[in-house]
Image (spheres, rainbow, N blue to C red):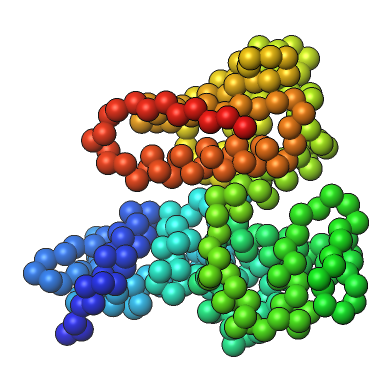
């Protein structure tokens, strides 16, 4: 009987249970250090396989099914947020991040060799992978990025595009895979890094340079700042209960209050002349606050109101 690895077993258990909770004809039973995987068949028949650990169950029976899911169903909602019942971080923890490589054909074609493919996807978040794929598309397919022809130090986009120069250097053979991974593992993705591409996307899709056309929730003839923050937070999978924007202390200044499900709230100052940089900083603050609140114990019912000014 396979000896359980106590350090790995909890994550395998979570993944197996999540997978089973979304199937109709499979179930698990755990008794006396044995895990029974039951498959229900027609005419009340069933097949039972027994395993000594959740890791063994995962490797033998569930891993293949998850791989099929990841390549045949929609993994993201309309806002680009991961919606599969097993999170990408959980998949990476059991060495299965590579299973979504089919979603990133340009990374596979231009940037990463076959021998490094499985390893590569274990290091990065969905946001980073999307950034890499987007940058490769701008450079190789759309020719929207130009450089000096020697070292890719001087990179320029033909339009107001954001792009990742590091993945382009890797794809063009100007940086080794080992150095690329080392640089990124030494500098983990910050809340600002996660927020920035979502804010740029919003400004680009709405043909914006600043917030001159935005106002409070009751302003007629203007777009609402609450709607902007709401869409960006939805794209970052930030959960909230309410958003409200009112006038600030002077003309062109606004105060947006974001309330969270535990009763806490945060207030953000925004001005009509603000652009991508300030909005990204505001979203960074919202994101960081949200993640800190998630770490609090569920029994903490205290309501904290936090004010931030820029």
Quadrant where the N terminus is found in the figure:
bottom left
Quadrant where the C terminus is found in the figure:
top right
Residue 115 vs residue 305: left or right? right
Which residue reaches farthest bottom? 115
Quarter where residue 32 is shown: bottom left
Residue 298: image x %, image y %? Answer: 27, 38
* Residue depicted at 53% across the width and 31% down the height: 308
Quarter where residue 35 is shown: bottom left
| Rendered position, 238 above or below 28 | above
Residue 142: image x %, image y %? Answer: 87, 63
Residue 273 vs residue 240: left or right? right
Residue 28 vs residue 276: left or right? left
Q: Is residue 2 visible?
A: yes
* Residue depicted at 31% across the width and 68% down the height: 12
User: What count of labels does the image hold?
Assistant: 0
Q: Is residue 65 visible?
A: no
Which residue reaches farthest left? 32
| Rendered position, 70 above or below 219 | below
| Rendered position, 263 above or below 30 | above
Residue 226: image x %, image y %? Answer: 62, 25
| Rendered position, 211 above or below 18 | above
* Residue depicted at 15% across the width and 72% down the height: 34
* Residue depicted at 72% across the width and 63% down the height: 164
- In this rendered view, identify the residue nearer to me: 249 or 201: 249
Residue 65: image x %, image y %? Answer: 44, 69
- In this rendered view, identify the residue nearer to me: 103 or 50: 103
- In this rendered view, identify the residue nearer to me: 242 or 27: 242
Residue 52 vs residue 19: left or right? left
């Amino acid at each position: 009987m396979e000896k359980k690895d106590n350090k790995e077993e909890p994550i395998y258990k979570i993944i197996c249970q999540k997978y089973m909770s979304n199937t109709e004809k499979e179930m698990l039973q755990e008794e006396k250090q044995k895990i029974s995987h039951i498959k229900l068949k027609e005419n009340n028949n069933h097949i039972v396989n027994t395993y000594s650990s959740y890791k063994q169950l995962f490797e033998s029976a569930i891993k293949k099914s998850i791989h099929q899911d990841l390549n045949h169903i929609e993994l993201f909602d309309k806002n680009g947020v991961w919606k599969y019942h097993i999170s990408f971080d959980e998949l990476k923890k059991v060495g299965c991040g590579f299973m979504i490589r089919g979603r990133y054909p340009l990374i596979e074609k231009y940037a990463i060799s076959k021998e490094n493919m499985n390893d590569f996807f274990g290091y990065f978040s969905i946001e980073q992978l999307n950034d890499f794929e987007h940058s490769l598309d701008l450079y190789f397919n759309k020719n929207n990025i130009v450089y000096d022809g020697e070292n890719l130090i001087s990179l320029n986009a033909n339009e107001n595009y954001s792009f990742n120069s590091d993945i382009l250097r890797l794809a063009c053979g100007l940086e080794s895979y080992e150095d690329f991974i080392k640089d990124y593992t030494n500098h983990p993705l910050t809340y600002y890094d996660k927020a920035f591409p979502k804010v740029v996307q919003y400004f680009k899709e709405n043909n914006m340079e600043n917030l001159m056309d935005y106002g409070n929730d009751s302003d007629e003839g203007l777009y609402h700042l609450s709607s902007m923050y709401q869409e960006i937070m939805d794209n970052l999978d930030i959960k909230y209960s309410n958003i409200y924007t009112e006038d600030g202390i002077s003309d062109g200044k606004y105060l947006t209050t974001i309330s969270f499900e535990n009763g806490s709230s945060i207030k953000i100052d925004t001005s009509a002349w603000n652009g991508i940089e300030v909005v990204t900083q505001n979203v960074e603050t919202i994101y960081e606050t949200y993640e800190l609140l998630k770490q609090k114990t569920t029994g903490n019912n205290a309501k904290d109101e936090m004010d931030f000014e820029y």
